[in-house]
Image (cartoon, rainbow, N blue to C red):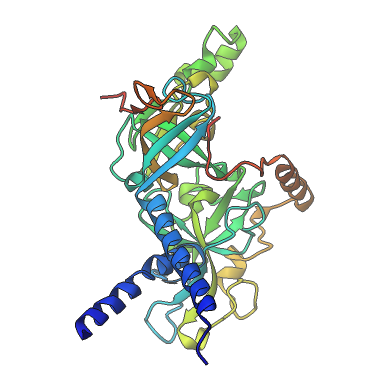
Amino acid sequence: MSISSGLKTTLLTLTWFPVLYSFTNHVYQPYQIEGSSMSPTFNPKLDTTSNDIVLVQKFNLKSINSLNRGDIIMFRSPNNPEKILTKRILGIQGDIINAKSPPYPKSQTKIPRNHVWVEGDNSFHSIDSNNFGPISQGLVIGKVIYILWPLNRFGHDITGTSSGNSGSIGGEGGIGNSRVINNESINGSISSEVMKIKPRELSVKQIDEY
Amino acid sequence: MPLPESLKFIVSTLSWTLRAGCVAHLLHEYVYEFTETRGESMLPTLQRNHDYVHAFKSYRLGRGLEMGDCIVAVKPSDPDHRVCKRITGMPGDVILIDPSSSSELTNNATEIVQHDGFNKYIVVPDGHVWCTGDNLCHSLDSRSYSVLPMGLITGKIVAANSMDKKFFTGGFWGFRWITNTFN
């Protein structure tokens, strides 16, 4: 009797796993940050050598206004789809970026529609858009919203604008960066026009070919 | 205070619906998908309308894909839309981008020289593929948005049905396998 009831409990618990997995896939999921490319925002290695754990938002990533300059995103590396990178958005569609050249072949580039330009806060240890160019918004899998671990930096400001996060962020990764030429009026009108002509009524289930 | 029977029944129904829905969603995302396609770009492999394709999701992120496979991918210029194309270049391949841009059938002499279509090549970088529609004249593909990152590939198309066909015509509803045309 006790064995069969134990089995029943186990099976009933197992049925919740798909729900949990869907939740981590589409709502929120904690991630551990590896590497120093986003230092000092993540893994500053000041008082501890352990890796930071962050909370990542998985919804509202595909629409036009969901990603902004200064957001930290996680995305699949264009060069290796099995690898997930964490970088800060420097420019969004329509912006003109003064890229670092070399490694980027051109000194100035315009970001295409639904692409973003990403760079690490620690520009000396970062493989980013200066190497592989602007990335498609479809590669983005999440937006980092909180630091969960270590506890003394829980909920610490990650926008890269505070005076506490000085150093390389102000010069390289922050908002209002001198390397980004964004004409807000032009860019704004472009995105609003895009929204108007976007065929929203199409069902998501269909595969569109053009 | 114990819950009334009717409320218990409602809660248990909702909870089982949620669990079953999540299982279906995961199967749809990681195992198999049956979905409608539209558009002229894959003629004659897929019709313009009424075609449904069977996609295997284990090939997502470009895992195990080969030259000539039909894929479903997120459109690089619009993450809300998906495209269905054939892989015509793998990492490391050298691709002649678009010779038709200098074809003397559709361009005048100055355009032929200007576009220089017979002389523009690209090496497909690591983790990317070159993909084109089977109907090259009416397809928006790698020739316009360049190489496609494998991270955008969601599956491989293995078969298709035409729902406007009668049930017994060849296969059921015009069932046919979609094969790799490069082998």
B143 shown above or below A52: above
- Residue A83 placed where, x, y %? 37, 57
Q: Residue at x 40, y 44 (%)?
A: B33
Asked whether, in this view, residue B137 is left or right of residue A51, the answer is: right
B72 shown above or below B48: below
Q: How many marks?
A: 0
Q: Residue at x 53, y 62 (%)?
A: A73
Asked whether, in this view, residue B32 is left or right of residue A89, the answer is: left
Q: Residue at x 61, y 8 (%)?
A: B108
Q: Residue at x 39, y 68 (%)?
A: A35
Residue extending farthest to the front is B5
- Residue B127 placed where, x, y %? 37, 45
Q: Nearer the viewer, residue B22 or A145?
A: B22
Q: Quadrant of residue A17?
A: bottom left
Q: Nearer the viewer, residue B33 or A161?
A: B33
Q: Quadrant of the N terminus of chain A?
A: bottom left
- Residue B152 placed where, x, y %? 45, 46
A114 shown above or below B131: below
Q: Nearer the viewer, residue B66 or A204?
A: A204
Could you tell me if residue A103 is visible in this image?
Answer: no
- Residue A54 placed where, x, y %? 48, 74
Q: Quadrant of the C terminus of chain A?
A: top right
Could you tell me if residue B89 is visible in this image?
Answer: yes
